[in-house]
Image (cartoon, rainbow, N blue to C red):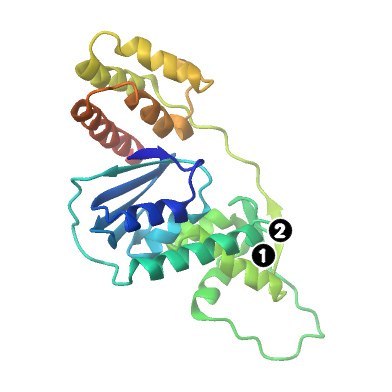
Amino acid sequence: MQGNLSQISLTDLLLLVTTGKKSGVLKLARGKESVEVYLADGSIVHAVCPIGEGEKALLYPVTWGEGTFSLLADGTTPTTTIQKSAAEILDEVRAMTHEWEIILELIPTGNVIFRIADLGEEQTGPITVPNVGWRILSKLDGVRPVQDVAEALRIPFAYVAKVIYNLHKSGLVEIAALVKKPLVDIVPPALLNRVTGILTEVIGPMAPLVLRDQIEALGESWNSFPESKLDELVTLVSREIADGKLKNRFEESMFQEISNFKQF
């Protein structure tokens, strides 16, 4: 099972694999980010993301509007970090997804910068801020974007944005600026050559043509292919492989190559 997160929500995807009593590892990827969710007969028992593992890893991709997913049936659970039932987890993800639609009105991107607001002399009463709220508040210096704050604290971006939204609603923080979106990262030709090599081992000499056709289908070119579409490219190419075993072999090899590339 595989597909694109632009076509199915995280909630519906988790509902699909849990009610279907699936076992294995559900791999989610967007650009350099990846999340692995381990399942055992429909129960979510472990999850890992770039900032940690457990329940917070399940909230990590809530904000993704794009990316790819694939379910590998032979994934072995390395440990158990999640004790809640699938229903409880789905309720949390569903609630966070709903809240996110409201939060987006204030924080449409991780590049928004906040700072502590000047409360003015009229504010004389006590101010109470929860522990995690204070941790986030202390990082809002008018320089760091929200995404950087989340990474520095190793807290899911969605949760950091939620806390900042509430701090803003209370009048404790204000928007300082919106930094420009960074330039698109380009996949180096060496990696695309590696993709060609792996695909050639699977389908033979037609591999370069298949790869170039799929790159063009995505509206891109070989010399300027964006990292953000790398996972989608693998998904499209794998659909051209009729043999199930060869398809799995290609996907597993590519997942490892992409993981190594993203870590680098």
Q: Is residue 26 left or right of residue 219?
A: left
Residue occupying image coordinates x 49% and y 55%: 62
Q: Residue 200 appears in which quarter of the rendering?
A: top left
Residue occupying image coordinates x 32% and y 26%: 238
The residue lying toward the viewer, choosing from 237 and 225, is 237
Residue occupying image coordinates x 58% and y 52%: 110
Evaluate whether residue 159 shows in this view: no
Residue 208 drawn at (x, y percent): 33, 11
Instruction: Work out which quarter of the rendered image holds the N terminus and state it.
Output: top left
Q: CA distance from mark 2 to mark 1?
A: 6 Å
Residue 247 drawn at (x, y percent): 25, 28
Considering every residue shown, the one lying at the far right of the view is 122
Q: Is residue 51 left or right of residue 71?
A: right
Residue 261 drawn at (x, y percent): 33, 34
Disc 1 packing (10 Å; few <14; some 14–19; many ≥20): many
What type is the residue that disc 1 sits on?
Arg
Q: Is residue 139 left or right of residue 212?
A: right
Which residue position is annotated with label 2?
A: 176
Which residue position is annotated with label 1?
A: 115
Q: Is residue 45 above or below residue 229?
A: below
What type is the residue that disc 2 sits on?
Ala
Please report whichever mark, 2 or 1, sits nearer to the chain's N-terminal start: 1
Label of residue 182 in the image: none
Disc 2 packing (10 Å; few <14; some 14–19; many ≥20): some
Look at the numbered disc 2 and give the secondary structure of its residue.
strand
The residue lying toward the viewer, choosing from 35 and 151, is 35
